[in-house]
Amino acid sequence: MEISQLDRISYSILLQETLELRQVLQSIVNSQDTIDNYDIFIPFLPIMSSVCLGWCDLFTKEGIKIEIPDIEGYSCVRFLKNCRIGLKLYCDQRIGKATKQLKKNSEETYRLLKTDYNIFQRLVVSMLGQCDFGVFTINELPYGNTSQLFLYISDVINFERYKSLGVWETEARKVVFEFSNLLSQFINTIIDSFAKSNMIDKDSQIELVKFNFSYNDYFLIDEKRRNILKGDLPIENQLQLFNILCQNNFIINVLPLVFQSGGLLYHRSRLQTYLVSVNTVKKIINKFPNEKYQKQLKEIVEVKEIYFDKDSVLRNNIFHYKIEGVDDSIFSIPEKYFYEFIEFNSRVEFNDFMQVISEEIIKINKVIYKMVEFC
């Protein structure tokens, strides 16, 4: 079957993002002595999954068979779809399912925490409590949390099968590393098939000295001692917002500052998390009106609707790697295909458009900080 010009353009854009992703992974591998891969890969999984699933979808449409090993008997492609949803988990009809899943995951974690303890330790927990929610920060900005991991791998690892948190954590780490390794191998295969491996800097490393990475435990499910997410909204909705806040911070801070990602991978990820953020905040505020945030949120939604209406070609193509709905005549420079696509659909110069997106994400974050009372 002959490949259309739009498909060739789609391949070209996706390959550029894949090369950028591969360079980030190389930096992580070279920095294993100074960085905990497990902590980084949790918020990074949705981005890796989106790129890999983009290739899976393109190959499937071209009739090219791909084989990726299962993980713990679970389809890797389905795993990709679940993790990719992590970036857009709160869109459209998924919000109701997400709220129930978040609360269930947190309650199950609290159960697992207590199962590792003896009678005396359980007595101490009953008196003093037990932290049940972990947050990863960079320069005091939250970029990941433990509930994200549960969302991504809950279909692979059923919490209810385990009697202790230690066993579950060991299994979770195993799955995260196995999944990450499979994706890395898949990405390497793609790059090798296009003869682009020479474009990867094999010596690149991440310099962490100037960044303050930390991890802190909080009380969340234990309502009497809760010291995080103390806003007025139901806890599951605050968790949704906090997950978005973490993903936003990871994409606009960790990706460019730590991983030196500043190309198409970074740009698309910003657009994806922006659209998810606006959609989720809009739905939650419609369900739980609040005069304190109404004006700010209305302005945020209005800006989004200037560039992305319900049937927006731009919006649809941000989440899918097969470009559709435009004429191939708008493209002229291979290295600039993505930029040309954005400029054609937004009617705004690319850098100016992305500046608006970044500013809006920061506005969204400020509102979320207030709504969940995180400081």
Image (spheres, helix red, strand yellow):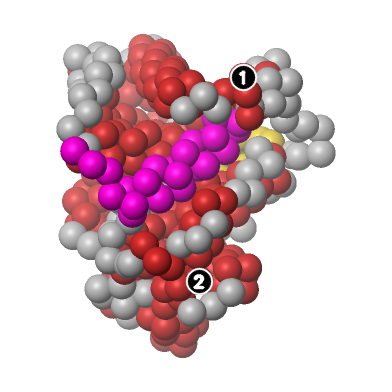
For mark 1, what is the residue?
A: 29
Q: Is residue 280 left or right of residue 101?
A: right
How dense is the environment of label 2, judged by Cα within 10 Å: few (below 14), some, or many (20 and up)? Answer: some
The location of residue 57, given as percent across then percent down, is 26, 39
Does the magenta portion include 357?
A: no
Does the magenta portion include 17?
A: yes
Q: Is residue 83 left or right of residue 257?
A: left
Report the disc number at residue 343. Answer: 2
Q: Residue furthest front?
A: 2
Quick check: can you spot residue 73?
A: yes
Q: Nearer the viewer, residue 322 or 34?
A: 322
The location of residue 151, given as percent across then percent down, is 32, 38
For marks 1 and 2 on the same chain, the one whose residue lies earlier in the sequence = 1
Q: Nearer the viewer, residue 118 or 25?
A: 25
How dense is the environment of label 1, judged by Cα within 10 Å: few (below 14), some, or many (20 and up)? Answer: some
Q: Is residue 110 above or below residue 192?
A: below
Q: Is residue 306 left or right of residue 195?
A: left
Name the residue rendered at 50%, 65% in the picture.
Answer: 340
Magenta residues span 1-24
Name the residue rendered at 22%, 28% in the picture.
Answer: 64
Name the residue rendered at 40%, 39% in the picture.
Answer: 51
User: Residue 79 sits in which quadrant?
Assistant: top left
The location of residue 56, given as percent across then percent down, is 28, 34
Q: Residue furthest right?
A: 210
Q: Are marks 1 and 2 in contact (CB under 8 Å)?
A: no
